[in-house]
Image: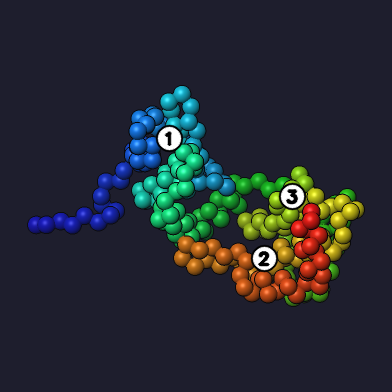
Amino acid sequence: MQVQLTQSSLPQESTEAIFERVYRQISRSLAPPRIHLLVKPYVNTMGKLHLKEGVLEVRLSDILAGAPSTVREALAWILLSKLFRRPPPSHWVLHYRQFMSRRDVRRTHQAVRVSRGRKYISGPQGSCYNLDEIFDALRDRYFPPLMPKPALGWSRRPSRTLLGHFDHAHNAIILSSLLDRPEVPHLVVEYVLFHEMLHLKHPVEHHGSRRRVHTPAFRADEKQFEGFAEAKLFLKRL
């Protein structure tokens, strides 16, 4: 009687063996270090590497610890390529993204972020601007009157690279405290908050491995903001 082995019935290669094999392939001539695996309850990353004194510490998120071996291999190629400052193979990046884009994986990751993540939310009142008042005015002008209001706040540090973000897991909009200054026009604060409010109206779309945050509909609505060009010009100079 002939028995066919399915992928699930085949023996799974250990994570340590995968990282050692990929290390050999990338380094070619270097002997692989001793692999030490740590499974961590990460929230915002799937894995990290730490190489010291002949030991490669692989810190893997528990979300991926039980993933199929091909997914763990994809992550090994991505992390080790970064370690050697080389671009990871595109097919492994695609494979990893396809796994992370699966609906069940996204739901698990979202639940983990909610249960484990800690979100600092300062509240809407800043030194110069009150986000609560600006949100209400923008909703009256551009959005349905019953659109729910998320938590609003300012960042602890005045970031220039991240002027605002909508955290879906914690239902919060956070603006950079860099904008909460007298020299920043009210119009600019309005625009940045308006941009983040659009994420409430236009959720992220997933098409296979592609994750589209700013859809064509999002971009079209964004241009309806009065003073769009003026606000963008100020932010560019900022």
Three-letter amino acid code at the position of disc 2: His
| First in sequence: mark 3 vs mark 1 | 1
- Is residue 54 shown above or below 77? above
Three-letter amino acid code at the position of disc 3: Arg
Q: Residue at x 72, y 65 (%)?
A: 195
Q: Residue at x 52, y 66 (%)?
A: 206
Three-letter amino acid code at the position of disc 1: Leu
Q: Closest to the observer: 101 or 179?
A: 179
Q: Closest to the observer: 210 or 170?
A: 210
Find out whether the residues at labels 2 and 1 contact each other: C-beta distance under 8 Å: no
- Is residue 235 shown above or below 52? below
| First in sequence: mark 3 vs mark 2 | 3
Q: Residue at x 74, y 50 (%)?
A: 160
Q: Which mark is residue 199?
A: 2
Query: Distance between the Cα atoms at labels 3 and 1?
Result: 36 Å
The residue at which mark 1 appears reads as 37
Q: Nearer the viewer, mark 3 or mark 2?
A: 3
The residue at which mark 3 appears reads as 160
| First in sequence: mark 2 vs mark 1 | 1
Asked which secondary structure carries label 2, the reply is: helix
- Is residue 90 shown above or below 225? above
Q: Position of residue 40 (x, y in %)?
A: 50, 39
Query: Distance between the Cα atoms at labels 3 and 2?
Result: 20 Å
State the quadrant of the N terminus: bottom left
10 Å neighbourhood of mark 2: few (<14), some, or many (≥20)? Answer: some
Q: Closest to the observer: 83 or 5?
A: 83
